[in-house]
Amino acid sequence: MRLMATPSDLELANRLADAAGEAIRPLFRGEWSEEQKADRSFVTEADKAAEAAMRAILEAERADDGIIGEEYGTRNEGARRQWVLDPIDGTTSFIAGRPIFGTLIGLLQDGFPVLGIIDQPIARERWAGRMSEGTTFNGKPVRTAPCRELSDAVLGTTSPHHFSDHEADHFMGLAKAVAERKIIYGGDCYNYGLVASGHVDIVCEAGLKLHDFAALAPIVEGAGGLMCDWAGEPLHAESDGTVLAIGDPARLEDVLEAMGHD
Amino acid sequence: MRLMATPSDLELANRLADAAGEAIRPLFRGEWSEEQKADRSFVTEADKAAEAAMRAILEAERADDGIIGEEYGTRNEGARRQWVLDPIDGTTSFIAGRPIFGTLIGLLQDGFPVLGIIDQPIARERWAGRMSEGTTFNGKPVRTAPCRELSDAVLGTTSPHHFSDHEADHFMGLAKAVAERKIIYGGDCYNYGLVASGHVDIVCEAGLKLHDFAALAPIVEGAGGLMCDWAGEPLHAESDGTVLAIGDPARLEDVLEAMGHD
C-alpha cells in the first residue's frame, strides 16, 4: 500500500474541520467551563465539543479507521489508517481570546503523516496539505519562502516554558543565530501554517505530542519545506516530541549546527 | 485645564486609526521593504506609511498639538497636548503574518495619557478608551474581568528577550504564581486590549517606550483595570518602561508581592 491520502480523505478532513469550527466559534470569547488535566494543560468545553463533533463524523463514515484524539483517546488502535485529532491546539490562546489557535486534523498511514489540516475557525483560515500533493491556504496553493541565511530568518516557538533546561540550551543556540527581534513567541500550530505560506522561516519546539505534530508535516512539506525532529529525522508516530519546521530545506544543516547538535 | 480628552479628540483618533489601517492592510502578508534600526528592532514600509498617513491628518487639523511618533520623531515638543503614535506595535508579528499587532494612538495631556486606541487592522478590531469615560471594543463598552486569585490568572508578555536578567527574575516570580499553562507569549499591544475585554488578567512587560504604552493606560483603566509601572506608580511620559496591566485592581498587591518588589 502506498503512503498517500486520497482526494476523498481530503474532502472528509475538510468536513471535520468545518464541524470543529461550528463547535468552537460560538464559545470564543464567551462563557465556557475549563479544567486542568494531569499534564497541567487546560481543556475547555470547546475542545471537547469540537473533538466530539469530528469523532461522530468519522465513526459514521470511516468505521474501520482508527482515531487518536487529544481529549477522548484512541479507537481501533491497530488500524493502518489513523485520524489524529487535536480539537484546539493552543487552548491557552483560545482561553485568552487570541485567534491564533487551530484545529488540527492529521491522517497517519502505517504511522507516517500523509494528510494535515490546520484550521483557524475565527479568522476562517485553513491550511491543508497532502504528502507529495502540495499545500493550500484557503484553497490556493502556497509555497515556503527561500531563506539565504539564518540571520535573515523569522523564528517561532510557542513558549520558553515548553523546553527542559537542556532543550532550552539548544533552542538558545538557534535563537542567537537569528535576529533577536525576529523571534516570535506564542502561536502554536498557527506558526507552522505561516511557514507553509512563506511568512515564517523556522519553528523550533519540544515536548510535542503526536496530536500536536501529525497534521503539520504534510502541510509544511507539501509547501516545499521540511519537518523533522531535532536529530534531523522524519516525524512519525514514535517521534520524541522535538520538532523543527524549516521553510527552506537548504538551511537544515545550518539549523542543526546552530542548535549544537552532536 | 482638566486632564481629559474630548469627544472630538476621540473622533479624530478614530480617523487616524482608519488612515493607518488603510496604509497597512495592502502590505500585510505581501511584499514590503524592511530595515533594522539602531535599537535592533525592525521597521517596514508599512510602519512608515501608516505613521505618515496619521501625521498628515494631525498636521492639517491640529497644527498646535505635539506629535511623538515612533518612526518620524517629535513635533511641537513643548505642547501640552501630545499625540503619541506607534504605527505598528508588534512589527515582528506583522513581518511573520500574524494578525495580533496593532496601531497605537495615544493622547497625552501635560504628560499623562488621557486617550488611547489599539487598532488591529486585519481583524478590524478596535479598542478605544478615554480616561474616566469608559472603554469600547468595536464601539461596544467592555469591562475587565474579576480575578479572585493569581493562580486563576491568564498572564501575558510579548517575549522573554525583552527582560534584563534582573527583570526576568521579577517576571518569573509572577509567572510561578500563575498556572504555567496560562501564560501567553507574543501579542504586544493586543494583549492589553484583551485585558480590557476581560479575557487576559495581567500583562507584565519591561523595556517599553512611551509610544508603546501611552495608548494603553486609558484603554485598560477605562475598562476598570489598572496600569502602572513595576513600583505600582501611574504611567507618564517619564516612566521607566516597566509596565503592569491588571484587570482586577484588587490583585495589585498580590502581583507586586509575587514579583518580589521591595
Image (cartoon, coloured by chain):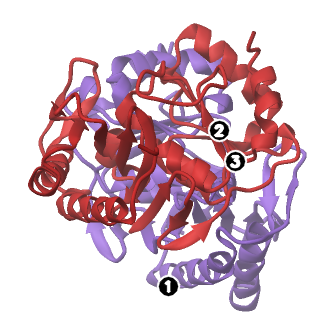
Chain colours: A red, B purple
The answer to whether the residue labelled 2 contacts the one labelled 1, judged by CB atoms less than 8 Å apart, is: no
Give the side of residue A75 with respect to residue A119, left or right. left
Give the side of residue A237 with respect to residue A12, left or right. right
Distance (Cα) linking label 2 and label 1: 29 Å
Q: Chain of mark 1?
A: B
Point out which mark residue B241 bears: 2
Q: Nearer the viewer, residue B106 or B177?
A: B177
Please, what is the three-letter code of the amino acid marked with disc 3?
Answer: Gly
Please tell me which residue is depicted at 76% across the width and 64% down the height of the picture: B69
Q: Secondary structure at mark 3?
A: loop
Distance (Cα) linking label 2 and label 3: 36 Å
Q: Nearer the viewer, residue B114 or A112?
A: A112
Residue at mark 3 shares a chain with residue at mark 1: no
Q: Of discs 3 and 1, which sits in the foreground?
A: 3
Q: Tell me the quarter of the image containing the N terminus of chain B.
A: bottom right
Query: Is residue A109 visible in the rendered structure shown here?
Result: yes
Image quadrant of residue B78? bottom right
Please, what is the three-letter code of the amino acid marked with disc 1?
Answer: Glu
Give the side of residue A178 with respect to residue A96, left or right. right
- Position of residue A196 relative to residue A1, above or below, is below
> How many marks do you count on the picture?
3
Q: Chain of mark 3?
A: A
Q: Position of residue A69 (x, y in %)?
A: 23, 37
Residue bearing mark 1:
B11
Q: Secondary structure at mark 1?
A: helix
Please, what is the three-letter code of the amino acid marked with disc 2?
Answer: Gly
Distance (Cα) linking label 3 and label 1: 44 Å
- Position of residue B54 relative to residue B150, above or below, is below
Point out which mark residue A247 bears: 3
Q: Position of residue A147 (x, y in %)?
A: 82, 49
